[in-house]
Image (spheres, rainbow, N blue to C red):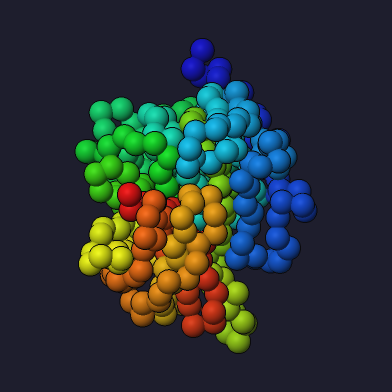
């Protein structure tokens, strides 16, 4: 049954490795921003599911109101011609949850995946479904909504999990899959984005924003202040500064409260009462700003 299931997956992949519709993609060749989906439209336009996938909603406080969940292997989007790119998403911890890069028509792909026994791994998955471990971390913890990113450039694979108690970063090298579409595997996801890492030609304006800063954290400092910290972000040129935003509501846009010239920490004002939600964005020399980090909450 497993072999038959993998053959079905390979057949579906062969038929679905196509670009997202124009409404969901940004034009250009290659565009630095490939696509994004927050599932607010409550549909799966542009995605090609293998298995059972559906949009869902939740009313839990401070959680994303719309997301996608699924089982049965894969949810694919993008083009078979994608080479150097990355996926980023929010997810709910569950073994089997992961991101897929360079998916092939015969079912082969790279996968960043949560395993049982508190493990997270980068894998090469063969056409018959056999998974070869390329990098492994043991001690990854469970949590609610968290962040996950998976990037490939040349033969370098880099995966990051923003988990509990610490963020996990894995690296691996592999040359078997030079290009292919991206996707999701088993789990609940929200705010999926894909970014190209193609290097611009000399003289080309830099329009590629940095990656999202990782592992935001905050603690109370002097009365009325907080110390916000984060891990470095990645850019195709260089990150020149970080912007820190504060909001009194998880879903509301933040107000800029300070900037820092390098990764590390920043002392900023906090709300006098209630929750303070802090997010961080990275900026490059051209003024491109990354998506903000997941919020760090000060109670």
Q: Judge whether 241 appears above or below 228 on screen.
A: below
In the image, residue 111 lies at what x, y percent? 44, 41
Left or right position of 270 against 151: left
Query: In this orientation, does residue 174 appear?
Result: no
Left or right position of 80 against 231: right
Q: Residue at x 33, y 40 (%)?
A: 121
Query: In this orientation, does residue 47 appear?
Result: yes
Left or right position of 170 against 84: left
Q: Farthest residue in the top direction?
A: 1
Which residue occupies the foreground of this view, 123 or 243?
243
In the image, residue 115 lies at what x, y percent? 33, 31
Q: Farthest residue in the bottom direction?
A: 203
Q: Judge whether 77 appears above or below 236 on screen.
A: above
In the image, residue 193 lies at what x, y percent? 56, 52
Q: Residue at x 71, y 66 (%)?
A: 28
Q: Quadrant of residue 145?
A: top left
In the image, residue 50 lies at what x, y percent? 61, 28
Which residue occupies the foreground of this view, 57 or 298?
298
Q: Residue at x 40, y 43 (%)?
A: 146
Left or right position of 259 against 63: left
Q: Residue at x 25, y 65 (%)?
A: 223
Q: Quadrant of residue 39?
A: top right
The mark total stands at 0
Q: Farthest residue in the right direction?
A: 22
């Amino acid at each position: 049954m497993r072999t038959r299931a993998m053959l079905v997956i390979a057949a579906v992949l062969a038929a679905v490795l196509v670009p997202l519709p124009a409404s969901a993609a940004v034009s250009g060749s290659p565009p630095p921003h490939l696509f994004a989906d927050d599932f607010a439209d409550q549909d799966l336009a542009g995605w090609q599911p293998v298995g059972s996938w559906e949009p869902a909603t939740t009313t839990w406080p401070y959680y994303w109101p719309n997301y996608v969940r699924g089982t049965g292997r894969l949810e694919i989007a993008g083009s078979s011609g994608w080479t150097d790119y990355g996926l980023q998403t929010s997810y709910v911890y569950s073994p089997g949850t992961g991101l897929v890069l360079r998916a092939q028509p015969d079912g082969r792909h790279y996968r960043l995946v949560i395993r049982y026994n508190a493990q997270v791994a980068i894998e090469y998955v063969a056409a018959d479904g056999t998974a070869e471990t390329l990098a492994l971390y043991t001690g990854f913890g469970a949590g609610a909504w968290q962040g996950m990113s998976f990037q490939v450039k040349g033969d370098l694979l880099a995966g990051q999990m923003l988990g509990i108690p610490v963020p996990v970063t894995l690296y691996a090298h592999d040359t078997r899959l030079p290009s292919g579409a991206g996707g999701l595997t088993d789990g609940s996801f929200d705010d999926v984005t894909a970014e190209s890492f193609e290097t611009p030609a000399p003289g080309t304006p830099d329009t590629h924003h940095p990656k999202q800063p990782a592992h935001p954290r905050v603690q109370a400092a002097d009365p009325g202040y907080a110390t916000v910290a984060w891990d470095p972000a990645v850019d195709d040129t260089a990150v020149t500064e970080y912007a820190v935003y504060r909001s009194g509501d998880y879903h509301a846009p933040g107000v800029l409260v300070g900037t820092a010239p390098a990764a590390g920490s920043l002392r900023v004002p906090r709300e006098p009462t209630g929750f303070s939600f802090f997010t961080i964005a990275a900026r490059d020399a051209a003024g491109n700003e990354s998506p903000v980090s997941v919020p760090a909450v000060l109670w």
